[in-house]
Amino acid sequence: MLVHEPIIRLGAFIAVFTAIALWEVVSPRRIRSYPRLRRWPSNLAIVALNTALIRVLLPATAVSLALMSERLGWGLLNNLPAPPWAALVASMLLLDLAIYLQHVMFHAVPALWRVHRMHHADLDFDVTTGARFHPIEIVLSMMIKFSVVVAIGAPALGVLFFEVLLNATSMFNHGNVRMPIQFDRYLRWFFVTPDMHRVHHSIVVNETNSNFGFNLPWWDRLLGTYRAEPAAGHDRMTIGIEQFRSGRELWFDRMLLQPFRGPAGAYAITRRRAA
């Protein structure tokens, strides 16, 4: 399975992206503010750029790093007498917690928020938003993930499962898809749902700084960052941030320059507390 990692990752991406995109057509949750042709070319161009950049700057993968750590005996799980299945489950839980904490950090530090805010500056919320991240953030995130993989001694299979699952759930919980309300309330005890994560993309600062989970919802509930609904309701809430509100900001060049334009704004958690 590990030998076929690139095929597995690409196949999973195409399958989930296609399924969510079709779901958005059949049963959309919200009316779009902008047509797909205004947003998707730039969002997908960012995905292509990030993929190429990672291949050049960080040719090693998290899976290959996990294999090396196992061979050298590095990391917590490689030095505990745990059965393989327990190490796999523990690694996926710890990696998910690390992603949650990283996400909070990117909201807490003004310099990191500048990089992360491109993800939030999308003026609609759909499957492509789940892959719209600035190249600087992608590189920083990969370096953090590499460090976590080595530190916890994550098994390679656990890393592969986690990365495929995280990619899939990111597209799912950014989907502009409608689900029965009762089913959503049940499902969000186990997975982050689109209605749960959409709150995080509200223009309201306190709502932006909530629901940080991408995969599992438990960290938000345990650490006090969970918010059930946006104050304005899902149909009336405004997507995005206070900056970069014009349609021109959806263009590829403006997206790349967003970290370097204008003030950090009021969204960074530490800035809000200092104020």
Image: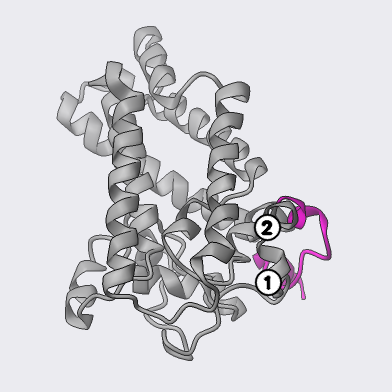
Q: Which residue is mark 2?
A: 113
Crowding at mark 2 (Cα within 10 Å: few <14, some 14-19, many 20+): many
Q: Is residue 88 above or below residue 119?
A: above
Q: Is residue 261 magenta?
A: yes
Where are the magenta residues, as a range?
256-275
- 77 part of magenta stretch: no
Query: Does 39 appear above or below 42?
Result: below
Residue 218 placement, left or right of 234: left
| Residue drawn 34% across the image and 60% down it | 21
Q: Position of residue 107 (x, y in %)?
A: 61, 60
Residue that appears at 35% across and 74% down: 195
Image coordinates of residue 126 in percent, x first then y, are 44, 65
Q: Position of residue 226 (x, y in %)?
A: 41, 72
Q: Quadrant of residue 55?
A: top right
The numbered disc on residue 9 is none
In this picture, residue 1 sits left or right of residue 247: left
- Residue 221 placement (x, y as % from top left): 35, 67
User: Which residue is disc 1 drawn over?
Assistant: 247
- Amino acid at pointer 2: Trp
Which colour style is shown?
A: one colour
The quarter of the picture where the C terminus appears is bottom right
